[in-house]
Image (cartoon, rainbow, N blue to C red):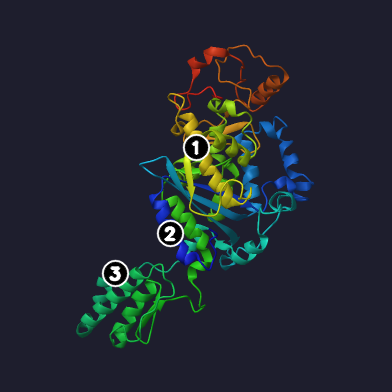
Amino acid sequence: MDVTRENFNSVFPQIQTLLQTCDFYAFDLEMTGIEVERLVGRGGGPDSLAAKVGTFPHKCRFYSTPFDAFPLKWEAATTFSPMQFGLAIFHKDKSSSVVKASTFSWHLFPSFHYGDTEIRLSSETIGSFLGKPGCMDFNAWVRNSLLYAPRETVASAAPPVVVSDESLIAQAPPGEVPQLKKSLQLLQKFATDNKNNTTATTPNKTLPFLSQPAFALMLTKSKSLGLKVFSGAISWDHGGSGTDPTVKHQANLLFEAMISSKKPAIAHNSWSDLVFLYRAFHSTPLTSYGDFKAKLRALFPVLYDTRTLVSLDSSVEFGQVRGQLEKTFSAFKSKHGRTTSIVKNEAFSEGNGAAHNAGYDAFITGSLFLYVSAEMRKHEGLTVELFNGVLPVYGSIFSISLHTEHDYLVQAPAAPVFYCIPAATVKGGGFVDRLATVFDNVGLKAIPMNCGDIWTEWQHPVLPLASHCCIA
């Protein structure tokens, strides 16, 4: 379902309920650009990323450490903007193998109400990536986008804290206390009963007549609740604009509903998505890579990246599955689609969605999570919980762990590195020699390869699989 400004008030309560009751949700984000190297003229040259990579000790993006990669991704997130968000919410049937998926998507636009008036587009991302047929409806992006703003800015613009009835009643003329109490109760009841109905109003003279001093106290209460009173009738105060004030930041309400649910979140190759999401909804910058880890694990205490999960040795029979999401999804579905039945409530199914439509990608990401989880259960002791917060670094051989201090995880089978005893003999040829040089240049220990069975003596207690190597 497409969520727009027009249907938001009716759809949002449904999404809230689904998130609060789900087993997990999956999300995907599309942006107006993803890499700073596409910006001509920035950083003193036509390829700023290449210039910056040239300052790395290892001179190569593929070997860039998380500390190298984070500033570049943060610059991209402050340069470009999210433009579409996809959310797929999954509920497992406790009595069967059926899983129900509810899929939503909405376009995103920075809220000009809070001063964010500039959007930068990457011609390559828009032209060759999102511009393909079926990928992105740019007209809908302009017409129907939900607006977003930094959470801190929205909070500072929120109505004042609701004042207590007791403090107001204590100031009222004694003879008008009963009428004021009744008025305050009616205001509170209206705000509670109509919290999702911004067009609600009551008949005239709903409120009892009050003298000027008591009326002023009643107005204090109504303003603190975001209400207005006219001719004794109660309605929401839209600031005189005739529009719902949440229109200024409807996307924020969806983001808050998602993270406040504290349900497991699933994403695919999520490094970029997470940095862009944080940047969109926060005015306080991430000051360092360590700050990035701390803030993200607070927002997403349980987060699984399907790119990590499909790269384990348990998935070796599926071949090269670290490429396109839809291709990986199809490979796992061909084996587990019959035993894990996913019922779509609407919109997307394999073959009729569009790659890089955020709603479709969110749906197949969540479905892939179910299929790869089924594959992992075939291996004793192998569970998805072992990989909570393990994320691949975009464009690098490394993965990170949000919940531990380990920031140099290398995954097999695509990466030809194993975690072995430091004294083992390095084998493997030129690639390994170059990799060892990279680690030496950035102050890491060289990584021996092809150490065979001795790896088990050095396995890490949190990531006990040969498919991850923890580089000290």
> Which circle, 1 or 3, is nearer the viewer?
1
Q: Residue at x 50, y 78 (%)?
A: 242
Q: Which residue is mark 3?
A: 164
Density class for disc 3 (Cα within 10 Å; few <14, some 14-19, many ≥20) is few
Q: Distance between the Cα atoms at labels 3 and 2?
A: 31 Å
Circle 3: element type: loop
Q: Distance between the Cα atoms at labels 2 and 1?
A: 29 Å
Q: Quadrant of residue 109?
A: bottom right
Q: Which residue is mark 1?
A: 338
Q: Residue at x 28, y 85 (%)?
A: 208
Would residue 123 appear left or right of 309 to someone viewing this image?
Answer: right
Residue type marked 2 = Gln
Would residue 120 appear left or right of 159 to someone viewing this image?
Answer: right
Q: Distance between the Cα atoms at labels 1 and 3?
A: 58 Å
Residue 230, image x, y percentages? 39, 85
Residue 1, image x, y percentages? 53, 58
The answer to whether marks 2 and 1 mark residues whose Cβ atoms lie closer than 8 Å is: no
Q: Residue at x 48, y 15 (%)?
A: 457
Label whose residue precedes the other's in the sequence (2 or 1): 2
The answer to whether marks 1 and 3 mark residues whose Cβ atoms lie closer than 8 Å is: no
Would residue 117 appear left or right of 461 to someone viewing this image?
Answer: right
Q: Residue at x 61, y 50 (%)?
A: 352
Circle 2: element type: helix
